């Protein structure tokens, strides 16, 4: 039976990688490996998971340098020979070991006005939104985001520019900009404009490469760039 | 925690690196370029002296590099203008490849005219 | 800097990029032509000093570069060093003015 050499980040912002030996099994996922370490070898290891079936996004970590959902990452696919290195998500403060503080990720979501605001009540008629309309298709392309933080962790502009709202918040803003029922677009476009907003994106496409739901935040941000420029030229940004 | 090269090892990121570095090098080169051209203000002799100096192989090589950098920055930039202003399509990798190909072609054209 | 100004800076950089795409293409073709034919200073200046079309073209080129390069450098510098705010913006503006001044001088010496 072969053995995996697994290097895991231990500590907070400062710390070190600690090595563990984990039996290699068929169809093993990286989450299985981390759970094995915590349950059988070192109970002090801190990590997050919930659904373990690729629905919640809680188990996101950096595996061999790339942000991934560990429950959906087969060891066979990513192990370098028999080596794995596992670290917490980048661009977020480390609480302990593999756990990060997601506060700023969600704060930026709010700052991008990434929540729906409508003006209808239960007494009004349902909104009629044709699913094949270009706007609804634009929404549908990005709506499946579950806020796992993988794209935010992968983004270099987030690393280089602490104010940058990040791909997830901007992607959500784009889905709302295209939501015909939403009434907050003037403020939303102002919120995502400029050096901390969509215009800071340099199309690295790390987000699109890594998104476990195959969304395209770069495309969403590109859409926002155009809309915001038009709003700026029309003097609608203030 | 910081990302390293493993997170960046894909075509769109390489395209960004080429674009940023070529832009930086060109921006640093420009003042020199403007100064040289300004030499013409001193008359043809000054410019001719300079042009003769540029006949050296090392200078020609530097010029070739500049042509490739300029072509790379331009083609990469056109790729970005397309990504940002046209409707989003999934051909970014082809665009990056096309940009790379065209800039190398420009360099080759320049080289062929030197020999 | 207000976000509206930041957006307009971004817009100006893309607009100048579009202008430069044309200018650079013309410039590259011209350079390849000149090197192919091994033009001397006298020959180059003989052709360029006559033409107000070339003068206008290269003035437009310089203007576009003086807008495009500094805005690009602004992003690069702030991302590489963390320097941002009014002092960086003033340095960037100064760089643009300097480039414009040297560029116009260069164009004038070759085409006027």
Image (cartoon, rainbow, N blue to C red):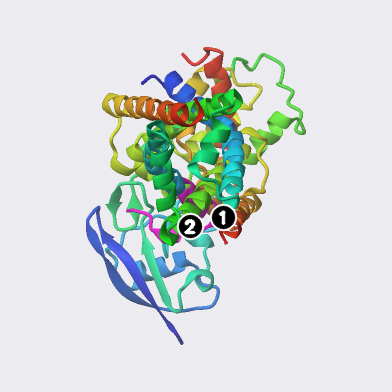
Nearer mark to the viewer, of 1 and 2? 1
Q: Which mark is residue C53?
A: none
Q: Which residue is nearer to you in this view: A38 or B53?
A: B53
Please give the label number shown on residue B107. 1
Tell whether A6 sits left or right of B60. Answer: left
Cα–Cα gap, marks 1 and 2: 40 Å
- Predominant SS along the magenta part: helix
Q: Residue A182: within the magenta?
A: no
Q: Which residues are magenta?
A: B1-19
Residue A67 x/y as whole percent: 45, 56
Q: Residue furthest left?
A: A14
Q: Residue C19's quadrant in the figure? A: top right
Q: Chain of mark 2?
A: A
Classify mark 2: residues with Cα within 10 Å, few (<14), some (14-19) or many (20+).
Answer: many
Q: Nearer the viewer, residue A16 or A40?
A: A16
Helix, strand or loop at mark 2: strand
Residue C81 % position (x, y): 29, 41
């Amino acid at each position: 039976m072969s053995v995996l050499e697994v290097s895991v980040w231990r500590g907070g912002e400062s710390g070190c990688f600690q090595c563990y030996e984990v039996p290699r099994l068929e169809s093993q996922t990286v989450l299985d490996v981390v759970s094995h370490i915590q349950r059988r070898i070192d109970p002090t290891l801190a990590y997050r998971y919930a659904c373990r079936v690729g629905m919640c996004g809680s188990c996101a970590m950096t595996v061999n340098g790339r942000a991934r959902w560990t429950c959906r990452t087969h060891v066979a696919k990513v192990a370098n020979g028999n080596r794995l290195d596992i670290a917490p998500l980048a661009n977020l403060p480390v609480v302990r070991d593999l756990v990060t503080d997601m506060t700023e990720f969600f704060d930026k979501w709010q700052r991008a006005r990434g929540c729906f605001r409508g003006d209808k009540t239960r007494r009004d008629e349902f909104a009629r939104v044709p699913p094949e309309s270009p706007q609804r298709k634009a929404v549908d392309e990005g709506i499946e985001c579950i806020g796992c933080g993988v794209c935010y962790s992968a983004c270099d502009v987030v690393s280089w520019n602490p104010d940058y709202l990040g791909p997830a918040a901007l992607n959500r803003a784009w889905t709302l900009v295209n939501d015909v029922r939403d009434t907050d677009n003037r403020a939303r476009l102002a919120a995502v404009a400029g050096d901390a907003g969509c215009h800071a994106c340099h199309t690295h496409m790390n987000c699109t490469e890594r998104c476990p739901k195959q969304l395209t935040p770069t495309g969403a941000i590109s859409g926002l760039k155009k809309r915001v420029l038009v709003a700026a030229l029309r003097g609608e940004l203030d | 925690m910081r990302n390293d090269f493993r997170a960046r090892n894909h075509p769109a990121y390489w395209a960004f690196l080429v674009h940023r570095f070529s832009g930086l090098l060109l921006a640093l080169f420009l003042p020199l370029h403007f100064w040289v051209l300004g030499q013409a203000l001193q008359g043809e002799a000054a410019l001719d002296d300079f042009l003769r100096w540029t006949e050296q192989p090392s200078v020609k090589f530097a010029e070739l590099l500049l042509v490739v950098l300029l072509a790379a920055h331009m083609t990469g930039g056109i790729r970005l203008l397309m990504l940002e202003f046209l409707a989003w399509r999934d051909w970014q990798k082809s665009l990056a490849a096309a940009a790379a190909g065209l800039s190398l072609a420009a360099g080759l054209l320049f080289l062929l005219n030197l020999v | 800097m207000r976000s509206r100004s930041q957006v307009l800076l971004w817009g100006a950089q893309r607009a100048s990029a579009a202008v430069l795409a044309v200018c650079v293409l013309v410039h590259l073709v011209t350079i390849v032509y000149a090197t192919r034919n091994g033009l001397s200073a006298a020959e180059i200046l003989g052709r360029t000093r006559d033409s107000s079309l070339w003068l206008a073209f290269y003035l437009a080129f310089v203007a576009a570069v003086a807008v495009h390069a500094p805005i690009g450098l602004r992003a690069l510098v702030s991302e590489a060093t963390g320097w941002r705010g009014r002092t960086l913006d003033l340095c960037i503006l100064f760089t643009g003015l300097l480039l414009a001044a040297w560029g116009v001088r260069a164009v004038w010496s070759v085409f006027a």
